Image (cartoon, rainbow, N blue to C red):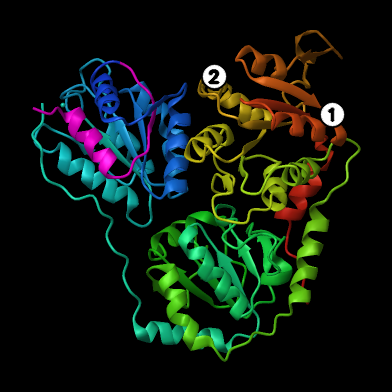
Amino acid sequence: MPTVADILIDGLVRAGVQRIFGVPGGGSNLELLEAARVAGLPFVLCHQESAACIMAAVTGELTGTPGAALSTLGPGVSASATGLAHAFLDRSPLIYLSDRHPGAALDFATHQAFDHAAFLAPVVKGSVVVTADSASHWIAHAAQLALKEPRGPADVAGRPAVPFAASITSAPLPQPSQADLDGAAAMIRRARRPVVLVGLQCRGGDAKWLRAFAEALPAPVLATYKAKGALPDPHPLALGIFTGGALEEPAVGRADLIIALGLDTVELIPRRWSYSAPVLSFARSPSDASERRAAGSGAYFAPALELVGDLGLILEELAPRLREHHADWDVAEVDRLRRERQRALEIQVPGLAPHRIVQIAREYTPTGTIATADAGAHMFQAAEYWHAVAPGEFLISNGLATMGFALPAAIAAQLVHPERRVLCLTGDGGFMMVASELETVARLRLPITLIVFNDAALSLIEVKQEQKGYAGASMRYGGPDLVTLARSFGVAARVATDETGFTGDLIAAQREPGPTLIDARIDPSGYRAMLEIVRGKPPDRR
């Protein structure tokens, strides 16, 4: 008779799960791993539960099927919280398998008893506990829940089982009414300067419809961090990243209609929406009005009209309704706005500039290379200067979210796409949060090029001790030796201090059969100016 583990693994396989990431312990986790081995479902041993969840989330994001992560009970669950929160905020489909003692959820006097569901409630879409007669049903439910719009993580906690027939299919999206399509077309026809804001709900299959739509209007397109590549960055209508700050003000501030295509409010900075133009929203799931209210009166946007359904189908249905429409945007004007934006971000510094690292990396890597970027001061340069020509070629956590994202994300991306190059762009702080996963990279022999933007913030800490009798004295703490650290794991490593050296190191790294770390000694003196440009007050247009 099959066990709960057998049923769960069978359910994962039927849901399209490609591999399981995790940090196993004793108990039922070992039964799950054995069942996975028998079923031929690969398991990737990780060093941190949160990193395993990020890997699973990125796998789900790239494949469109749920990723899967596994942890031990109690502390293993609590250590997973950051990774699950990442999946929740990034709308990544994920099935999380957590262990538990039989009855522990009810017996709080038991050693290590831990109410998983209560702890995880804020960062998962739902939690289920499988039993001997319900495992097949609940694993199917978890897969459906993870894939239901908006996507996100579902927690499955589990004990011999009996098979229970279950279908793992996601519910079809609603179809907008003809009246709503006519209303949307009328709003677009009245607009002379529409702007398109594309968000994370716009996926690979929608990209061709977005391009045709933008070219037919025509209208400039700004993408959120998560939607980068939905319209190829080199396209004449691609303006860059929508940051929610002053950078895009020259274009969006002049729009008479904002078309939000797959834009999820979770992607926006929680503050008052600063634009007066009406918003026409095309989304896979309804805008969350309660989320807007929770953020404060007037936060985010309230669509003048919202169509919910398959984005490609909505754009296809709109096409014949807009044949005679032509907006007033001039392609040359859009190009000027884009060049002005990029020049503003090219801040010159005495040493190795962060934006030059990204520009050189893009120039000297082949088409189709995937870049992952961490949160931190370098993320603006990474997002602006890494040219992606398709969805999934630039991976970043939502907004200013999860530090320590880039390395686990690069591992997942390389496993999903072993035929492509993967670059990991991370700061020294974010890298040190997940440095143990270097062993994972080395063990799997993944040819990832890890570029660390090392601004010496970890090695130039001065501590004044005047209050302890050491007036005027200071102490300098030596930061981590990244090259020695990488080589201790069997990872090739180099140091770059200028553009010529970095270019040579990058070319050499791509010849390596395994992973390489480049310690890029960047000059951080332009960070303050960069933040002022990106997050400063919008200019006065009067």
Direction right: furthest residue? 350
**Residue, far top:** 469
Looking at the rendered structure, the kind of residue marked 1 is: Thr
Name the one closer to the observer, 71 or 65.
65
Look at mark 2 in the image and give the residue it sits on: 439
In the depicted view, which residue is nearer to us: 475 or 347?
A: 347
User: 10 Å neighbourhood of mark 1: few (<14), some, or many (≥20)?
Assistant: some
* Residue nearest the observer in this picture, 540 or 268: 268
480 left or right of 35? right
Q: In this image, 98 relative to 524: left or right? A: left
Q: Residue at x 16, y 40 (%)?
A: 136
Residue 14, by quadrant, is: top left
Q: CA distance from mark 1 to mark 2?
A: 26 Å
Q: Residue at x 73, y 64 (%)?
A: 538
Type of the residue with mark 2: Glu
Is residue 203 visible from the viewing direction of this image? no
Answer with the quarter of the image where residue 126 lies. Answer: top left
The residue singled out by tag 1 in the image is 497
Residue 321 part of the magenta-drawn span? no
Q: Are marks 1 and 2 in contact (CB under 8 Å)?
A: no
Stretch in magenta:
1-25
Residue 67, compared with residue 32, is above or below; it is: below
Q: Is residue 169 visible?
A: yes
Looking at the image, the residue that sits furthest to the bottom is 324
In the image, residue 303 above or below residue 496: below
Between 119 and 321, the residue placed more toward the observer is: 321
**Tag 2, which secondary structure?**
helix
Q: Earlier in the sequence, mark 1 or mark 2?
A: 2
Q: Secondary structure at mark 1?
A: loop
Few, some or many residues within 10 Å of mark 2 (<14, 14–19, 20+): some
